[in-house]
Image (cartoon, rainbow, N blue to C red):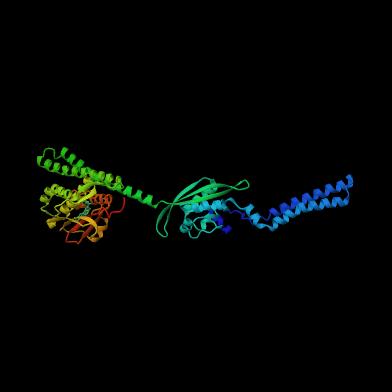
Amino acid sequence: MATNLPTTGIEPQTERRPEAHPDRWPDRLRRSAVVLLGGLLGLSAAVVLGGLSPSFASLVFLCIVAAALVPWRLRQDMPASEDRIGLRPAETPVAQALVSGMPEAAVLLDRAGRVLQFNLAASQLAPALRRNELALFALRSPEIIAALRQAISTREPQRAMYVDRVPIERWMEVIVTPLALPAAFGGTESCLMMTFHDQTPLRRAEEMRADFVANASHELRTPLAALSGFIDTLQGQAKDDPKARERFLGIMHAQATRMARLIDDLLSLSRVELSAHVRPDAQVDLVSVVRQVIDGLEPLAKERGVTIATQLPDTPVVIAGDQEELLRLFENLIENGLKYGASGGRVVVALNDDQPGEGTGETRVSVRDFGPGIAPEHLPRLTERFYRVDVVDSRAQGGTGLGLSLVKHILNRHRGRLLIESVPGQGATFTAAFPHPKASPLP
Ligand code: ADP
C-alpha cells in the first residue's frame, strides 16, 4: 500500500500501533543491565575496600537483580497494561465518541491521511472507507485529494467543493482541519479531521434566486425597451404625426401598466413568502370575497365577451384568512379564465362547502372556463414563477407569469391547496381548496 503513496503525494507514516513498539523492551533491558553493572561494581568495591562480607554482598546483589529484572518480566507478561499505556490519542474512546457524535460525515485521519476513525454518515458517503487504510482509496475525488495534500503540507485548514454523483447528484463541501490531539502522558499526536457537508439545498436555493433575478430583470427590461423605443420615435419621425402619436402613447400606456403589474406581483409574492409561516386568523366570508372580485372583473368580462355564471350559497361561508390575499387569489383565477378561456364565452364560479365530517372536509371554490384548456405536460409547472404555456399570448394579455405562483403561495399560507384539471379543447378548472378548521393540520 505504501508504494502507492507517491502517486497521491502523501508521505507514508510508519505504524505506531500498541503492539508495534518492539524498541521499548531493549531500551528497558539496557537500563536494567546498567543498573546491574553499577550494582556489581559498587558491591565489589565495597567488598575489596570496605571489608563487606562477600556473602552479604552477594545477597544485596541478588536483591538488585530481582529489583531490576522482575518488573520487566511482569510487564512483558502484561500486554494489556502496555496497550493502555501505548494507546494513541486518536484511538481513545473519547476521540471515537467525538467522531461518532458528529452530525455530518466525519473521518479522523493520521498525519499521512490514514483512516483512524469514521462515523456512520461517512461510511454511507464512502462505503469503501477502512480503518488503517489511506482515505484517498475510498474518496477518489481530485478536489478531496488536493485539499488533503494541502492540509498535510501546510498544516492549515482547507475546504473544497466537489460533486458526488452516486447515488444521486449532490454538491458537497469537504473541510480538512489539522488537529493536535493531546496524549495522556504528555505530547501530542498530529491528526486531520475531515468533515463533509451537503450543500445541495443551498446551491439549489442559490440557483433559484439567480434564475428569479434573471427572469424578473428580463420581464422588466422588455417593456422598458419598448417604452424608450417609442419615446425616441415620438421625439423623431412621429413628432408631427398626431395619429402615430396617439397609437404609440396607447402602446406605451399598456407597457407601463405591464411594468407596474409586474412590480405589484413581485411585491405581493415576497410579502406572502415573508408571512408564509404565520397562519392568517381573521374571519373572512368567501362568498362576499368572490362576489366582490366578480363585480370588479365585469368590465373585463364584457370586453372579452364572456359571461360569468355563479353557483354560490346565499349564506356566508366563513374561513380563517387574509381578506386582501383572498381577493388577489380569486382575481387571478377568474381573470385567467376570462383571458385564456375567452373563446368558450363562459366562466363558472362555484363554491362547495362540505358539512363538517362529510366529503372532502374542505371548502372549495372552483373557476371553470370552456376555452382551449391546457396540455397535460404543462400542468405540473403552471405554478412556477414566470412559467407560461404561451409566452407571447401571456404578454399580449398583460400577464406576468406570476399569477398562479402567487395563488399557490397564498393557498399554502391558508393551509389550502390548488387543484388544476384540464382536458385540452374543453377548458380548464382551477380549484382553491381550504381545509375546514377541524381538519386542518396544526400551524
Ligand atoms: P400570467 O400572468 O401569464 O397569466 P399565470 O401564472 O396566471 O401567469 O398563468 C401561467 C400560465 O398558465 C399562463 O401564461 C397561461 O399560459 C396558463 N393559464 C393559466 N390559466 C389558464 C386558463 N384558464 N386556460 C388556459 N391557460 C391558462
The mark tally for this picture is 0
Q: Is residue 247 left or right of residue 275?
A: left
Residue 10 in view in this figure: no
Q: Position of residue 427 (x, y in %)?
A: 17, 59
Q: Nearer the viewer, residue 109 or 161?
A: 109
Q: Nearer the viewer, residue 424 or 100?
A: 100
Q: Nearer the viewer, residue 397 or 342?
A: 342
Q: Is residue 247 left or right of residue 30?
A: left
Q: Nearer the viewer, residue 214 or 295?
A: 295
Q: Position of residue 338 (x, y in %)?
A: 15, 53
Q: Position of residue 56 (x, y in %)?
A: 86, 50
Residue 168 in view in this figure: yes
Which residue is found at the position 12% from the left and 43% from the top?
247
Q: Position of residue 1 (x, y in %)?
A: 57, 59
Q: Is residue 27 left or right of residue 13?
A: right
Q: Is residue 165 left or right of residue 356?
A: right
